[in-house]
Structures are given as structure tokens and as C-alpha cells.
């Protein structure tokens, strides 16, 4: 089986997660390819890596953002086993955004497309290790994809933005980030998508943001720094 590990980053010097990703790849009988794409346009970066996987006709595609670090030996094998166990088309690791509230980029749809309810790290620890549900929105920070099905050629990463008036009448900027847009595309295609915390990771920014301990707020929006007039915190991802 062929596996492509994509390590998108802002610049080549920031691709410091590469060695960790490659070091664990001898655990299975896998033909592992590694692809680093460095550019500032986020979705072009992701789509370039996706095209690399399409052109190389791989069996699995694994995206690992350069600022995400798995901390346990055998994490790749864990991901593959969970994907097999649940017959998932896509398996995403729950990862906190780089903000003190402890919210993650895993979310559940609401009646407002621009304001899903994000799952917090503390909340996620009360869920099963691996789960799915209606309206699930997952992230791309560490995302494993079964690339053996034709749908992989009918999807792409894109970001949608808008400027609108909030409830107070002030103009605000809102965004549908690429991971939530990708999640919605997957749902329209009828795919089986799961999220997991079985792989422990740290998300690096101004601090270190782990996905395996209780910290931050219990629920999205509890903090005084909660969303205001639709202005999202997803920029901290």
C-alpha cells in the first residue's frame, strides 16, 4: 500500500514536523512518500499536496500540519487501525486551536452555517475516543484519508468569506474555513467521517496546546473572549 504524508507549511524552514512523521512509517508494510509544500496561500498549499497524492495514485493520504506534533510512538499505526475499525473514509484528530479558551476546530453544525458550535478539549474528553455524528465538522491538522475511492477526484479545499452586519449593526467579517467547507463537501458526497482523540498531539504556537488533558473552558463561548457579532476565532488555528 502507498501512503503519502503531506506536510504543508508557510515556509520550508518551518517544516519541523517532517522528521517525526517519517520516523514512524516503518510500522506497516507501506510504501511511504513524503511531500512538503511551502506557500502562504493555505488552500493552494493543501490542494497542491492533494494533487500530488492523486497523480501518484496512493492508497492513503495523511495531512500533518507543520505545527502539529504527535507525542506517542505508533501514532500512525493507531490512525490506520481506527480507520479500519470504523470503515472511515476520513479520520481527523481532534486538535485545539491556539487560544487559551481550549476550543478545538472540531465542531457541530447549528442553524447558522457561519457559527457552528465548537467542541472544547475538556468536552471532547467526555466523548468516546473515536466518534461521528450528524453535522460533524472536522479539521485538517492531522487527517487520514482513504484514497482508494473515486470521490477523491471530486473535491478540493476552499475558504469562503463574507462581510455582513452583526446583531448590533456593526459590520463584521465571517469565514467558513477550509476544514469545515471540506467537511460539508464530504457530507454531500455521503462519506463516512470520524474524529478521534486516540492520537495524542500538541499544537504549537505562542504556547503548546495539547488535546489529551482538561484545560480551558468546558463549553464553547463560556469565556469572556467568546465570539462577538459573528467574529470567529478560527484565525488562531
Image (cartoon, grey):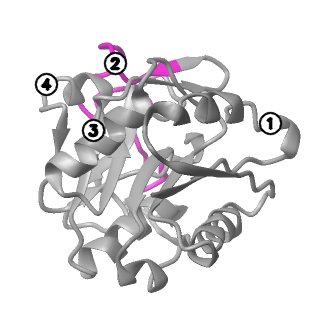
Mark 1 closeness class: few <14, some 14–19, many ≥20 residues within 10 Å: few
- Label 4 and label 2: CA atoms lie apart by 11 Å
Q: Residues within 10 Å of mark 3 (few under 14, many from 20)?
A: many
Q: Nearer the viewer, residue 167 or 106?
A: 106
Along the viewing direction, whichever of 28 and 100 lies nearer the viewer: 28
Q: Locate residue 148, reporting x and y percent.
A: 38, 72
Q: Few, some or many C-alpha atoms within 10 Å of disc 4 (few <14, some 14-19, many ≥20)?
A: few
The residue under label 4 is 126
Residue indicated by mark 3: 196
Residue 40, position as x, y percentages in the image? 79, 57
Q: Earlier in the sequence, mark 1 or mark 3?
A: 1
Work out whether mark 4 precedes mark 2 in sequence or the reverse, and give the earlier one: 4
Residues at circles 1 and 3 in contact by the CB criterion of under 8 Å: no
Secondary structure of residue under mark 4: loop
Rounded to the nearest whole Å, what is the CA distance between mark 4 and mark 3?
12 Å
Q: Earlier in the sequence, mark 4 or mark 1?
A: 1
- The residue at which mark 2 appears reads as 212
Which label was assigned to residue 14?
1
- Give the residues in magenta: 209-232
Whether residue 89 appears in magenta in the rendering, the answer is no
| CB under 8 Å between discs 4 and 3 | no
Sequence-wise first label, 4 or 3: 4
Q: How far across and how far down the image is residue 81, in percent? A: 26, 41
Of helix, strand and loop, which one carries label 1? helix
Residue at 64% across / 66% down in the picture?
Answer: 43
Direction from residue 188 to residue 14 in the image, left or right: right
Q: Position of residue 39 (x, y in %)?
A: 81, 58
Q: Residue at x 47, y 50 (%)?
A: 232
Label placed on residue 67: none
Q: Quadrant of the N terminus?
A: bottom left
Q: Nearer the viewer, mark 4 or mark 1?
A: 1
Amino acid at each position: 500500500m502507498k501512503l503519502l504524508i503531506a506536510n504543508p507549511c508557510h515556509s520550508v524552514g518551518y517544516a519541523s514536523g517532517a522528521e517525526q512523521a517519517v520516523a514512524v512509517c516503518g510500522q506497516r508494510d507501506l510504501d511511504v512518500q513524503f511531500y512538503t509544500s511551502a506557500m502562504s496561500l493555505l488552500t493552494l498549499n493543501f490542494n497542491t499536496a492533494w494533487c500530488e497524492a492523486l497523480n501518484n495514485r496512493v492508497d492513503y493520504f495523511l495531512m500533518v500540519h507543520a505545527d502539529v506534533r504527535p507525542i506517542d510512538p505508533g501514532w500512525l499505526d493507531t490512525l490506520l487501525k481506527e480507520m479500519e475499525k470504523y470503515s472511515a473514509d476520513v479520520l481527523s484528530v481532534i486538535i485545539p486551536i491556539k487560544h487559551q479558551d481550549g476550543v478545538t476546530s472540531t465542531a457541530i453544525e447549528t442553524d447558522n452555517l457561519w457559527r457552528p458550535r465548537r467542541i472544547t478539549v475538556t468536552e471532547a474528553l467526555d466523548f468516546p475516543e473515536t466518534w461521528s455524528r450528524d453535522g460533524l465538522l472536522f479539521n485538517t491538522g492531522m487527517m487520514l484519508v482513504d484514497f482508494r475511492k473515486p470521490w477523491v477526484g471530486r473535491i478540493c479545499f476552499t475558504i469562503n468569506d463574507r462581510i455582513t452586519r452583526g446583531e448590533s449593526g456593526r459590520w463584521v467579517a465571517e469565514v467558513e474555513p477550509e476544514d469545515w467547507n471540506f467537511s460539508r463537501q464530504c457530507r454531500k458526497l455521503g462519506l463516512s467521517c470520524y474524529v478521534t482523540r486516540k492520537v495524542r498531539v500538541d499544537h504549537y504556537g505562542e504556547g503548546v496546546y495539547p488535546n489529551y488533558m482538561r484545560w480551558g473552558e468546558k463549553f464553547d463561548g463560556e469565556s469572556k473572549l467568546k465570539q462577538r457579532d459573528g467574529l470567529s476565532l478560527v484565525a488562531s488555528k
